[in-house]
Amino acid sequence: MSARPDLNIRHLSPAFRTFCGDRALEVLPRELARVGATRAVMICSPSVAAQAGPMRRLHEVLGDRLVGQFDGVEEHSPLPAVEHARALLQECGADAVIAVGGGSAVVTARAATILLAENAGVRTLCTQRVDGKLVSPKLSAPKLPQWVVPSSPTTAYAKAGAAVRDTQTGERLALYDPKARAQGVVLDPGFALTAPPRLCWSAALNAFSMAVEGLQSRHVDPLADALLAHALRAVVTWLPRVADRPLDAIPRLQLMLAAIMSGQGTDHTGGGLAQALSHAIGPRSQVANGVVEALLLPHAMRFNAPVVGDRLAGIADYLGLADRATGAVIASIENLLDEFGVPRRLRDVGVAKESLDEIVEHAMGDWAITAGPRMPEADDVREILRRAW
């Protein structure tokens, strides 16, 4: 009689409502009414605010329920922008938040609601290293309900955390609170077409990379694997079509659905090494975090390979690869990234060699690095970066 396999799972699915289609925006008034909200504030970037047609439709749908708009979102969610968004939420007496745009809008909205509710400085609320371990303080105050109307396929809309950038030190300060998770996402074709194809491309690379890293996790969860495997296949199928059919919303909406699945799946499996490194490198490069993450993905896979051979074979199955050997799977991922147009070297995306030591320091303080199947030491990270540079 064979031994019983070890399959101990704790899989909790947070409430999250997804709406997609030509009339998806029309659900927002009902969603606000469902939680008793009458004073919503919109948070977006200047480029999204300038999209006259889609924004006019959103304003018409919300009517007098919309009491304010912050359109100062910046890439990487710098702390000053987040503080300004928090101040507007307070000034307007907001009882709901609607993030419109890409990952920076989602993160800025989430971080602003946390700072508003907790009424404390970000240094008090962020994840910190205590006795050599990363610890996230318990944030107990109720948070404003949030919805996301995305313009790009970012995994951020499915997450409970937010990270802001301290512009003075360059640090990435992580805020984690399950109560700050969005109520749901509204996928509108008009907003999906507002993002330049290149932005859609870079955001989808994040969804792809996170799915690959999640599928290597030491936390084996078939329910999460199903989400991640479908996300992986969806990106491979639909990402090339964004460039081929730039005026067609369907590929973009399919990638947004893939991003939801990748984000939700990695909630259960955790992040990974490439994700943590991209957080530290992104602001020091000339490209979006998703591009950096994809560039580093094969390097992270090689580092993890000694402990995830069976999981890599599973990725081969999900992608329909004939060769399930570790080296062949990593090579196939590299070939896919080449087809996607991902750069191969950090120097090619503007990362200075002199910044690598600082990147190592910041990456070792990133929560995502603790979730990988193999925990690196600082010297391991330094060597990975050297090879990638």
Image: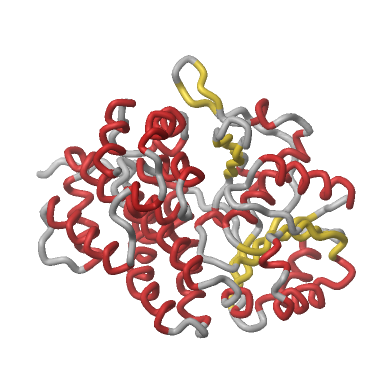
Q: Where is 346 relative to 208, above or below?
A: above
Tell me which corner region of the image, top left, top right, bottom left or bottom right, holds residue 271: top left
Task: Say left or right for 21 vs 297.
Answer: right
Task: State the residue at coordinates (59%, 59%).
Answer: 16
Q: Is residue 222 visible?
A: no
Q: Point out the image quarter for the C terminus.
A: top left
Task: State the residue at coordinates (58%, 75%).
Answer: 20
Instruction: State the residue in front, 289 or 15.
Output: 289
Picture coordinates of residue 160 (x, y %)? 58, 46
Q: Where is 56 relative to 328, above or below?
A: below
Q: Is residue 299 visible?
A: yes
Picture coordinates of residue 311 (x, y %)? 23, 50
Total number of numbered labels? 0
Task: Say left or right for 298 vs 322.
Answer: right
Task: State the residue at coordinates (55%, 36%).
Answer: 172
Instruction: State the residue in front, 375 or 382.
Output: 382
Picture coordinates of residue 330 (x, y %)? 19, 54
Task: Say left or right for 173 vs 93.
Answer: left
Instruction: State the residue in front, 310 or 209.
Output: 209
Task: State the residue at coordinates (52%, 84%).
Answer: 247
Instruction: State the residue in front, 53 or 41.
Output: 53
Q: Point out the image quarter for the N terminus.
A: top left
Which color scheme did the rendering employ for the protein? secondary structure
Picture coordinates of residue 356 (x, y %)? 38, 34
